[in-house]
Structures are given as structure tokens and as C-alpha cells.
Amino acid sequence: MKDILNKRRAGILLHITSLPGTGDMGDLGKEAYHFVKFLHDSGVSVWQVLPLGMTHADNSPYQCLSAHAGNPALINIDWLVDRGWLQRSEKKGEYFGNCSKKRLIAEAFDGFLERAEQHDKDGFAYFCQTKAFWLDDFSLFVALRNEFNQLCWNQWPEHFKQKDANAIKEARRRLKAEIECIKFEQYVFFRQWFDLKAYANQHGVFLFGDIPIFVSYDSSDVWANREVFKLDESGEMSVVTGVPPDYFSQTGQRWGNPHYNWQYLEETGFHWWVERMQTQLELFDIIRIDHFRGLEAAWEISAAEDTAINGAWVKAPGKALLSAIREAYGSIPLVAEDLGVITPEVEELRDEFNLPGMKILQFAFGGGTDNPYLPINYEKNCVVYTGTHDNDTTLGWFEKLSEDEKKYVNDYLGNPSYSLHCALIHAALASVANLAVIPMQDILELGSEHRMNTPGTTIGNWKWRFQWDQLSHERAARFAFLVGLFNRK
């Protein structure tokens, strides 16, 4: 498995929530399997998704309630019906929205307790036992968060905020039924994901996941492992993370995540991070470390600042961390998201561990011929994209260029007779990069209204979904032809 990234491959970027279906978002049901079949039939061997965690109200997969837990909203209800745990089959197809789905999963848990086969019950018990290192804290955290009307943990009553031992013991007793149901949600999510992963691997498709470098302040990780993060004695943040002004935002991005207490992590052998990586390695065949440059130095901002303009780069022990991960798991397929302000030190860290970096074609046409995102400057050990989930679609991006910029792009691509976005896909697949990943929106020739996320904004993101009727036979055939033409099968 460690050699996955050493072969020419093609991939498609599509989050699970963007799959077709009848509910509010895509899930791990039949459409996911249909998509795997489409990938297999197209010669595509990599399916890249966004983080799978349980999101907050804004649905951002990069701000989750746990670094380990899966998102119950991605659970497919038909799967529960098919196993007889949710008996009222007339409800199939009628669940819209997370609240309704949550109620149906709770009903399925009652059915599981009453009717499940012994091997399923044994499997649940084994899951709870082996995942206890994160599941016990997470399930209690979510149960308490529900009790306190979804307030962030720093607004809970003091004895729960500070994890008073007696209060926690009483809460585990009082909320036992809900805690068990939350654990069941995770059991179901992981079973459904592992079923999908097995099916994908059997069809020659590897799953490519994304691990945000930082975690949300409002998460079980911060509540339960306060010493891992830079917090004051009351648990509040004095500094937060982000990035300085860049291509995406003139005021930078103030993410608001807590920064790591790297000294404590080093002293404990990076145990928290090693356990975090264990979960991701179970879920994925390939893992992208989002904001990789933060492992060399991260942009730290005073919590009192409203933007990310005023901050400072704070060094991180990335070499020691990656060494600890390698010591625990050997050489694993990691990709460094090395976009943004990249210094020689960041490149040295990436190269020391032989990690492929990222090349974005939408960034390639500013500056001169030494632009690192131009295909003429690639090496094999990299991953090329037309754009990422944070970019506009390629069609939308091109339409916003000036006439001079459009001319330069067309000249570089040889003034193609076919559409520009197709030429950019052609350039990505033709490049020397071992892995070329194309967002589904670009394969479908979609405009700006179909982009997944606009960094620095909080409205209208993470909602895009595709429909199969958008994928014409001509588009699918053309993409499959290019995959084969450039030996990415």
C-alpha cells in the first residue's frame, strides 16, 4: 500500500455530501457504490473526499466535533432497514434532514438491541472497546452538548466545563442510554464506511482522505485533552490559528482553532497525534495533511483580533511529529497540502519525508515561466489538480480572467480547439505528476454557482451536489479516453 503514490493514477475529487440522492445530502448508500463503479469504468483509481467528521451547524468538514468520529448525517438509513433494525420500511425515502435521520437511527438502535444477531452485538461491543480511547469522551461530550442546547463547552456549567470527576461520573450514569445510542451511530458509520472502502478497493479504487491540521475548539478533543492545546487555566484561548492575507483573502483567514501545545506533545511522544493518525489510516488508503506548512510554522493570531492580518509565524516540531508517525506506522501514503506561503524550510520538511506536494493549475498562469504550478516545472512526486474544493470551478475561474490572462492561458495550452476547462483537464492528466485529481464539477463543465467553498465566507458553502443526468455519455467517455491516453489506468 505504501507504493500507491508511485504509479501514474487519475482521481476525482467529490465529497460524500455531494453524491446524488433524495435526502439533504449524499450518504454512504447505493449512490456511493454507483460512483465507485463509474470510477472503475473510467479507469480512475483514486476517489478523494473531504474530512468525514461530525460537523457544526455550518456543515464545514474542516471544523468538526471530533478528530476521530464520523458524521452520522452520512449514514444511509436503507442499510438499517435492510438489516431489520429499523422495521418500518414505509419510512424509506422519507427521511429529510439530520434531525429526522437522527430519530430514525435512535429507533434503529432500539431494534438493534431487540433483534440484532449475536455477531452484530459482539461487533458493537468490540467497536466500543477498541475505540474507547476517543469514543468514551466523544459520546459523553455530544450527550452533554445536546443537554446544553448545543452550546460550546466553555459555556457549560463550570463543573462540566472543568470535567469535575463527580459531575462526569453522574452524567455518565444519567445519560447512559443516550451515550450508548451515540456510540451506536459511530458503529454504524464505521461499518458502512468500511463496507464502501472494501467495495472500492475490490474495484481497484483507493480512498483519499483529508486530515485538517487543527481541530475545532468546540470539540471533544479540546474538552477532554486540554493539555494538548494552548489554553489558559479557565480553558479559554488566548491565541487562535489561521493564515495571513493571500490569494483567497486580503485580510487572511482567521480560522479560530486553538493552537497546539507542542512542548506537551513532544514530551508525550506525540501520543495524541499518533492516535489521531491511527483512525485516519483505518478510514483511508491515502491521507492529505491539510495546511502542511503548519507543521513547520503556523500563523498565530491573538484571540482578540477580528481578522488574520496581525499575527506571527510560530515554529512547530514537524520533523519530530512525522518521525513519530513513521515510527508507529512505517512509510504511509501521505500528501502534503503545501499551498500558500511556502518557505524553503517547509519544502525541506516535505522532501525529507518524500511527501508529494500539490500543484494547482488555476495558480499556474500568474508570473513567469518559473511559476511552480506550471506543468513544465513539475516532478513526478506530486499531485496535480485543476482546482481544489476551495477554488472556483475551472469554467468559473476562466470566465473571470482578463482578456490578456485568457490569451496567456490559451497560448500556453496551445490554443486548443476544444473548451478551455477540457484543455486544463488534458494538461493535468498529461503532466508528469504521478497523481492527477479532477474535481467532479470540472468533469461536468459547471460554472461558479457550483463551487464547493469560498474561503473567508460562511454562507452557501458545502452544499453542492451533482446529479447523474449532468454526466452525459460524451463527457464520461471523453474523460475515460484521456485517462487511458495518458497511461493513468
Image (cartoon, rainbow, N blue to C red):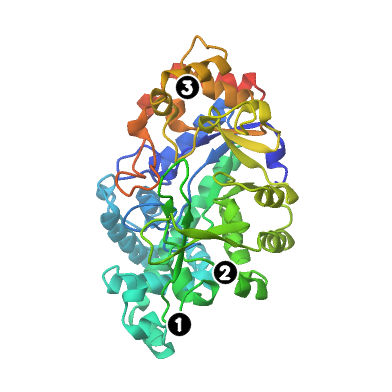
Q: Which disc is residue 405 wearing?
A: 3
Mark with earlier residue (2, 1): 2
Q: Outermost residue, front direction?
A: 310
Amino acid type at circle 1 is Glu
Identify the residue position indicated by label 1 in the image: 233
The residue at 44%/88% (across/down) is 165
In the displayed structure, would residue 143 be above or below residue 412?
below
The residue lying toward the viewer, choosing from 257 and 471, is 257
Q: Where residue 31 appears, x then y in whole percent?
A: 41, 38
Q: Secondary structure at mark 2?
A: helix
The residue lying toward the viewer, choosing from 423 and 104, is 423
Amino acid type at circle 2 is Thr
- Left or right: where 380 falls relative to 108: right
Q: Where residue 484 appears, x then y in whole percent?
A: 62, 21
Q: Outermost residue, bottom direction?
A: 166
In this rendering, the label closer to the viewer, 3 or 2: 3
In the displayed structure, would residue 225 be above or below residue 193?
below
Question: From mark 2 to mark 1, how far is it between C-alphas?
Answer: 32 Å
Residue 443 in sight:
yes
Mark with earlier residue (3, 2): 2
Identify the residue position indicated by label 2 in the image: 130
Mark with earlier residue (3, 1): 1
The residue lying toward the viewer, choosing from 164 and 408, is 408
Amino acid type at circle 3 is Glu
